[in-house]
Image (cartoon, grey):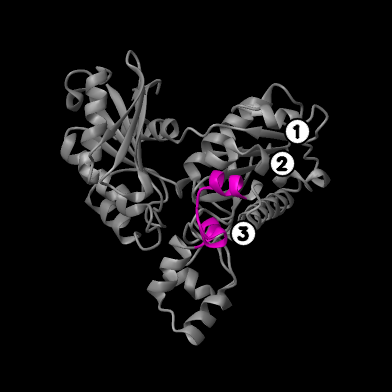
Amino acid sequence: MSILVFNSGSTSLKFGLFEAESCRDLASGAIDWADGDRRHALLTFRGEPSGQRCAEVAVPNDQAAVSCALCALTESHLAGPQPAAAIGVVGHRVVHGGAQCAGNVRIDEQVKATIAGLAELAPLHNPPALATIRAAEAALPAAVQVAVFDTAFFSELPLRARVYPLPYAWYEEWGIRRFGFHGISHQYCSRRAAEMVGHAHAFPAGRKLRIVSCHLGGGCSAAAIEGGTAIAHTMGFTPMEGLMMGTRSGSVDPGVLIHLQRQHGLTAAELDDALNFRSGLLGVSGFSSDFAQIEEAAAAGNPRAQLAVEMFADRVRSAVGALSVAMGGVDVVLFTDRVGENSAAMRAAVCDGLECLGVQLDRQRNAACRPDADIATPASPARILVIHTREELMIAREAWRVARRSGV
């Protein structure tokens, strides 16, 4: 038996095949729609014995994308000649589970209704996840379908980190609270960080390992993780709060939104569109949401690109500082996902000024690093780690755990 994982987003579908029980990685792939245009997609696939390959594919909808992923696995013979018989569990990344789905669960009609009901709080993620679930159910009707929620890792946030300073009845009666996102990535990377530093560095006996995890990609967030448990997070009721992101604003003064409604007549729908799709790096730079492109333009002298890079680094640095203080200090600062793993200049900019917390960057290690790596100086009191996030592996582990609990 094998476990198939789908990690769906607004412009991509990542997938992976894992061996049951051991969760050994057998194959992985991704279907990317360039600029969100579903008429043109690029399939990348890695798996023995075929190695790695790339191909242009026609996948106009989520059902076609799921079929394309299954075809790639069938052609590689990794899922056997009949994947429907070999794949016993399918794990799905779902961004928002709300209070209704505080943990990872087997998918039924009620779970799907919950995911659909939370779509307006995670408009970039919940709708494609639900479409992928339905397509997977149709293609693999005998498999156990499991939802693995980004919010699950943050379900036990302390009350002080969960409640907003708003009328308390809004929390009690309407469920207005902080949830936290990117939990699958933060959970995997914090465990990997503990492995990396556990035997190499001695921290005071009896003290829990204090980690600030920075997930920096199209979406960005940072989390304070103490002894493997999340105690604070930059995102909140929706994945829009916190750090500046690719197209999302991150935290802004709510008075700005009230002013725009009163003085400029913007509707709730117009504000939603601007904050989710036209802000962040794209809004400031004016030409791209891709950090690599903006970084290149900044190096060439584009002033708005330079401003976007400076703002991005400032906000991440401020978050690291605040989250470190929430734990009374920090033992590990980790960077992950596309920007966190690939931009040495950004990591250097974030760490510049964190020396007061014992975070001392080795610039040569930083410039030359490949994940997973420690880029702190040997004498640094806190370690600085660059970790390749493996969300699909974490989803496979959690899906298998839920499936076993269900009697598979």
Residue 314 position within the rendered picture, expressed as x and y whole percent measured from the top left: 69, 54
Residue 304 numbered mark, or none: 3
Name the residue: 18% across, 24% down: 85
Residue 254 position within the rendered picture, expressed as x and y whole percent measured from the top left: 56, 74
Pointer 1: what residue? Answer: 363
Q: Closer to the observer: label 2 or label 3?
A: 3
Q: CA distance from mark 2 to mark 1?
A: 7 Å
* Mark closer to the chain start, 2 or 3: 3
Magenta-tinted stretch: 279-297
Label 1 residue SS? helix
Q: Quadrant of the N terminus?
A: top left
Packing grade of label 3 (10 A; few <14, some 14-19, many >=20) is some
The type of residue carrying mark 2 is Ala
Label 3 residue SS? helix
Please tell me how many numbered marks the rendered image carries. Answer: 3
Label 2 residue SS? helix
Q: Magenta part mainly helix, strand or loop?
A: helix
Name the residue: 65% across, 54% down: 306
* Mark closer to the chain start, 2 or 1: 2
